Image: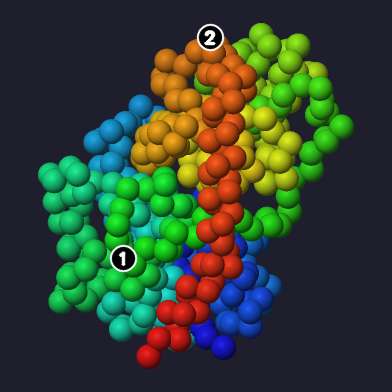
Amino acid sequence: MSRFLFVVPPLAGHINPAAAVAAELAARGHRVAWAAVPGTVRDIAVGGAEVYPCAAPARVHRPSALRGAAALRFLWEDFLLPLAAAMTPGTRKAVDEFRPDVLVADQQALAGALAAERFGVRWATSATTPAEVGGSTATLPKVEAWVRSLLTGLRERFGDPGATHDPRFSPELVLAYTVAELVDTSAPNVRFVGPALHTRRAAPQFPWEWLDRNRATVLVSLGTVNTDTGSRFLAECTAAVRNRAHRMQAVVIDPAGMLAGAADATVLTLLRVPQLDLLPRMSAVICHAGHNTVTESLWHGVPLVVAPIRDDQPFVAARITAAGAAVRVRFGRADRVRLGAALDTVLDGPDHQAAARRLRDRLRAAGGTGAAAGHLEALAARP
């Protein structure tokens, strides 16, 4: 039996894959613990798993208009760096008390990697987005130099100043929850395991009788962090579907309740849905190209219409579009006409559906949670 400590940021999209792998390791008889912001993992942590509380920085509102370099600067200076500083004391305490054989650090929970190198603990990277598997800024020398200067400063404060590797990438194991076709990297320590799907507790109820088997059903989602930017986009999506009501209906995830009262026989708006249960019944997905939504959709062979907003989303959108499984639209310019045309393309033509099924087969063959757990066991067993 080995001990595995998972260090994760307070972001559901980063916690869920780790939770799936942690549950698999626990089922195999290993001990699992978490270093995380209180409340973010207790609902999904395996029963009995120890949770070492970490602090979180003061909540900072990200302006919805931020894009490109400004969004990247905000991500690092206003979120990742303060998060690393806030989580370091709790993470160090977890390492000291739990004494893990392997620490599994999410790429955005830099406190995990820095604590591991400072105390000589073997560690692996949990890479929840393909944009960072090979280093999305590697082709932008000035941006990469700026990021590395920030990492050097973090390392001098919290890590091992003598270390030379990039703390975003473990030198021994990087778990990538995708497949090689959707990433541009040849790093030897990357293991492509496909999506790590997890049965989420307290799944919301859904009116299954509402689904019309005689019409195509579209799932519309912008994730949980884009509620301040999505009202116009969601409204245009519903209008595009209503214009095709004779052959199409839509389930719209609307966590902020911006489309309250919009439900009828063609459009159903809900604050939350059991997404993993719904996807096998979907004909297409419209989303912001968030990696978890994309891979979960492709896991079921569902083609997509993607409208990336910021961060890693343009990279994800570019890769799945190049693979033939999606049509890309511009988030800021997407209206009911453009969205409707994109839906017609992915639903009526065979190419996008065939590409989605091809990627489904590749993702499932990668092994998912079982493969990820096996790689971590092998790492723990190394002399």
Label 2 neighbour load within 10 Å: few <14, some 14-19, many 20+: some
Q: Is residue 216 left or right of residue 133?
A: right
Q: Nearer the viewer, residue 192 or 224?
A: 192
Position in image of residue 218 (x %, y %): 66, 27
Q: Name the residue under label 1.
A: 188
User: Mark 2 or 1 closer to N-term?
Assistant: 1
Q: Can the viewer see residue 352 in this picture?
A: yes
Q: Residue at x 58, y 68 (%)?
A: 370
Indicate which disc residue 337 carries.
Answer: 2
Q: Residue at x 74, y 15 (%)?
A: 247
Label 2 residue SS? helix
Q: Is residue 264 left or right of residue 165?
A: right
Amino acid at the residue labelled 2 = Val
Q: Could you tell me how many numbered marks the image carries?
A: 2
| 300, above or below 189, in the image | above
Label 1 residue SS? loop
Report the quarter where the N terminus lies: bottom right
Label 1 neighbour load within 10 Å: few <14, some 14-19, many 20+: few
Q: Residue at x 62, y 12 (%)?
A: 239
Q: Which residue is drawn at 20% across and 52% down?
A: 147
| 278, above or below 28, in the image | above
